Amino acid sequence: MVETAASIDDVWSWLEEIPDPEIPVISLVDLGIIRGIRWHEDTLEITVTPTYSGCPATTVINFEIEAALRAKGIEHLSLVRQIAPPWTTDWLSDKGRAKLESYGIAPPQVAGGPTRCPHCHATAVEKISQFGSTPCKAQWRCTDCLEPFDYFKCI
Amino acid sequence: MSVQGLIRLGDNTLILGQRLSEWCGHGPALEEDIALANTALDLIGQTQLWLGLAAERSGNGQTADTLAYHRDAWDFRNLLLVEQPNKDFAVTMMRQFLFDTWHYEMLNALTDHIDPEISAIAQKSVKEVTYHRERSTDTVIALGDGTDESHTRMQTALDRLWPYVGEMFSADEDDLMDMAALRPKFDVHLSETLQESTLTQPESDFFHQGGKTGARHSEHLGHMLATMQVLPRSYPDAKW
């Protein structure tokens, strides 16, 4: 009944197509939360790490992984939650960072704040609040074009 | 490993998370409302990790949900500080600052814990708590060194909450670490922040206790639990 098991590379490319539920411009793979994919006998095991411990998107993400892989014919699936090492924005892909900025969200910076406004690219920016519309974002403002924008916090 | 020690940490984050969520839709400014709700969300997320591990270790069929919703006040092991009512924004932010300052040092120390699961939760949580502490510190400074009105309210809040600080550093064998050892680092951050805030640290070293042992919670906890637990207690099989 089962044909050849899907290759690990295939599974990565399928997950690459699943958008983050709150920031749909980047994929789950771009976000860096898929920590491992492996076959354990006839069960496909996906290791997922949460971004923020209370982020409600985590549950939705698990549903979406399951739905996408079932649609590809995966019958036995196991999702493993891994919290250590904790997720870090260092795991965001370069592609993901570029997509965030073109979407209007300043990508995370080690310095702790955005380097420039994602709208007009001016470097004169100021913090409004350490917290924003989702756990992973802070609110900043460009003092040049005066537009507020989201900044993806560096953790 | 002491299950009680895990429950203490999970109950702190649960009760403070629930308290902060009372502000949702009532914050003094949109940004503050969002920040309080975000902090509450992080704390409830951490609760799922701590109480989840406590339930697993107790091995009697408990889950994080049964621990949160099917215990009464006398079985809770949170600090008295976190169950204190929100009152005004000054009291809420002073409570947050005092808790965050302790929580940050405590989690940092726990990242080296010998138990890998405890260390993992601490490593995850401390990243979030770093942001909490940064914000509550900034807010205490801005309001302490603000207008006459905000200064007076922040000093009143500090005086009111001061008798709940000492319990954070009381220690017994159920704790996951030596809580008393955290005091020097706590005092450094506290005095630096208060100095910049132009607030005066109270002199008394008296403190209320009975929260983390469950011996003597304040009357506020029961009222809060009545609200928090009503749905799962009325409909025990309800699923999210």
Image (tube, grey):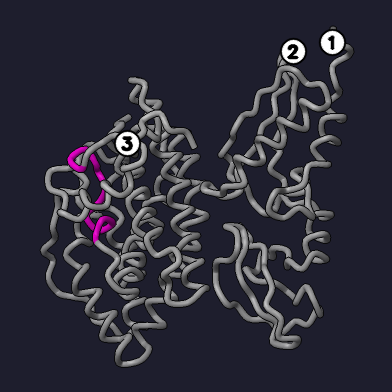
Q: Amino acid at mark 1?
A: Val
A20 and B240: which is toward the camera: B240
Residue B168 at x, y percent in the picture:
25, 55
From this view, report whether residue B204 is shown above or below residue A124.
Answer: above
Q: Amino acid at mark 3?
A: Ser
Residue wearing tag 2: A42
B77 part of magenta stretch: yes
- Say if labels 3 and 1 share a chain: no
Which portion, as a residue range, is magenta?
Answer: B73-84
From this view, report whether residue B189 is shown above or below residue B74.
Answer: below
Quadrant in the picture for the N terminus of chain B: top left
Between label 2 and label 1, give the one nearer the viewer: 1
Which image quadrant is residue B161 in?
A: bottom left
A130 part of magenta stretch: no
Residue B87 at x, y percent in the picture:
27, 70
Residue B234 tag number? 3
Which sits earlier in the primary sequence, circle 2 or circle 1? 1
Residue A2 tag number? 1
User: What is the spatial separation of the Cα atoms under label 3 and label 1, in whole angstroms?
Assistant: 46 Å
Which image quadrant is residue A46 in?
A: top right
Q: Residue at x 41, y 83 (%)?
A: B142
- Say if labels 3 and 2 share a chain: no
| Chain letter for the residue marked with disc 3 in the picture | B
SS state under label 3? helix
Proximity of marks 2 and 1: CB atoms separated by less than 8 Å: yes
